Image (cartoon, helix red, strand yellow):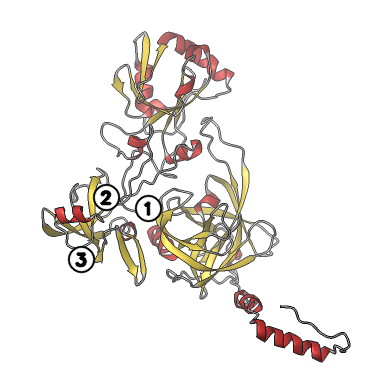
Amino acid sequence: MLLCVPKRHNLTPTFLIAIIVVLGAFLNLSAPMALAESTISPNLIPDGIVKVRAIHSHPDYESPWQSKPAHTVTGSGAVIDGHLILTNAHVTQDETMIEVMHENGSRAYSARLLQICHTCDLALLTVEDESFFDDMKPLKIGGLPKLQSRVNVFGFPEGGESLSVTSGIVSRIELGSYVHSLQHLLRVQIDAAINAGNSGGPVISENRIVGIATQARNRSENIGYMVPAPVINHFLTDVKDGHFDGFPELGIAVQPLENEAFRTQIGLDNSQGGILVIGVSKTGSGAEWLHPGDIVLGFDGHAIDRRGNVELRKGLRVDATHVEISKQVGETLEVEILRDGSNKKLSIEMKKAAPLVARLGEAPGPLYYTFGGVVFQVVTDGYLKSFRVYPPYELTRYRDTLAGGPYRTALSSDISNQRKEIVVISSLLADEINRGYENFSNSILSSVNGVPILSLAHLIEEIESSEAPYLRMELESGAVMIFDTAEVRERNPQILEKYNVYRDRSLSSDSDVMMSKSR
């Protein structure tokens, strides 16, 4: 709208003010009001927010005998009860040194990592110099915020040194993948800006922490995610005894029951929900209780609908997995099932599963062995993430949608008496004795001289105890490698020296055969 004022008028200050007031009323100028609502008084900014600086030295899965060059990561944290600092696991992962600072502080304090949970991307730090906590009021943990509720994100993102505050609303609450661990847990989406350096900073509503900023969506505007209070409280409760147990699992694969013909055939009426069990992990909590063909109707009194969701609170439905993994290890989950036409109630003690592929932070690594220039490694979450053979898949109890490829069986398998680890060819140190085997990287090793390989230690034992003139290695793809045993043993030291590999195997293992053997 244009306002035309005749030139002959003398525009006095009073007249100008009157025009501005009328325009404001006419146009309903809401931008200044919105700004005022999101502005936080300095007196209301918590003083328990700190900057975290960590030196990382990550393992190098391409050259597993060494680490990658050290680099610095900055993040944020929140002081909570007990002289503890809550932050993200990915801020402190593979740290060699951690420092924390107050806002506008002139001194960095050495911090120590107390507990870390890669699954939910949370970590706890402390500072030995207790003067760091003087005059700091610990922040309290709140509850799960409501949709459309306003939140403030505090932290130290890149672009400046002082504390940053951004505001937004809660736009989505659901189970989703955490980028750090690729595990599915409850997460909350907010439209406040989250940038590099915000990681680990508190998300606050009504003077309480309702989440910890953890990740943002690339190529999207103001779509960020936080670890919500229920997950934070699960972590803090878990580590109260000084020991981290993690999240338990039933270990079942299921399918939803939305198809009417399917429902009619198995005897479900329109008022009933439920999910069909199609697989049970041998190491999950439900191994001795649940069977393929069971219909799970509810967890802890929460009815499961035909899509596999439960009502968390009025108007909010989430995947039923949330009820399951909200339990602490050792607690009991009440499960209602329909089996052979009869309703049954089961009380199942929850425990951690033991997947064949160890999850992030739950295995030493990298575990490797070199023979004839072939580098063998144990497949772990860290290995899969490093080589980007991980996505796209979701390995959850309710939606097992593993992508095809050589890792399909491995990722959905359990540790058993027959197989303790998946051994893979990670790379090749090119030499004339391994010519023709260049394309076998990321291939799973099946057997050596007809003996199925159960672990990396078992592989080493089979190779080094063999008296056969040739070693025949079969891969799960069907490909075969054959080596002259004596020739390889003679060439091994030269290959290691040529590629500056100072040790032919890793130090960490449960077996004596993995003891260090330098070149």
- Looking at the picture, which amino acid does disc 3 mark? Ser
Of residues 365 and 147, the one drawn nearer to the viewer in this rendering: 147
Give x and y (percent) for residue 102.
64, 63
Crowding near pointer 2: few (<14 within 10 Å), some, many (20+)? many
Question: Badge 3 is on which residue?
Answer: 271
The residues tagged by marks 3 and 1 sit, at their Cα atoms, a distance apart of 36 Å
Image coords of residue 57 (percent x, y): 57, 41
Q: In this view, does 308 lie to the left or right of 61?
A: left
Q: In the picture, residue 481 is in which quadrant?
A: top left
Pinpoint residue 121: horizontal percent, then vertical percent.
Answer: 47, 53
Query: Disc 1 or disc 2, which is closer to the eye?
Result: 2
Badge nearest the viewer, 2 or 3? 3
Left or right, 326 with reference to 430 = left
The label number, if any, that marks residue 246 in the structure image? 1
Residue hosting label 2: 254
Q: Is residue 81 visible?
A: no
- Examine the image and state in which quarter residue 30 appears: bottom right
* N-term-proximal mark, 1 vs 2: 1
Of the numbered discs 2 and 3, the one sitting upstream in the chain is 2
- Mark 2 element type: strand
Classify mark 3: helix, strand or loop.
loop
Q: Can residue 427 be seen in this view?
A: yes
Disc 1/disc 2 C-alpha distance (Å): 23 Å
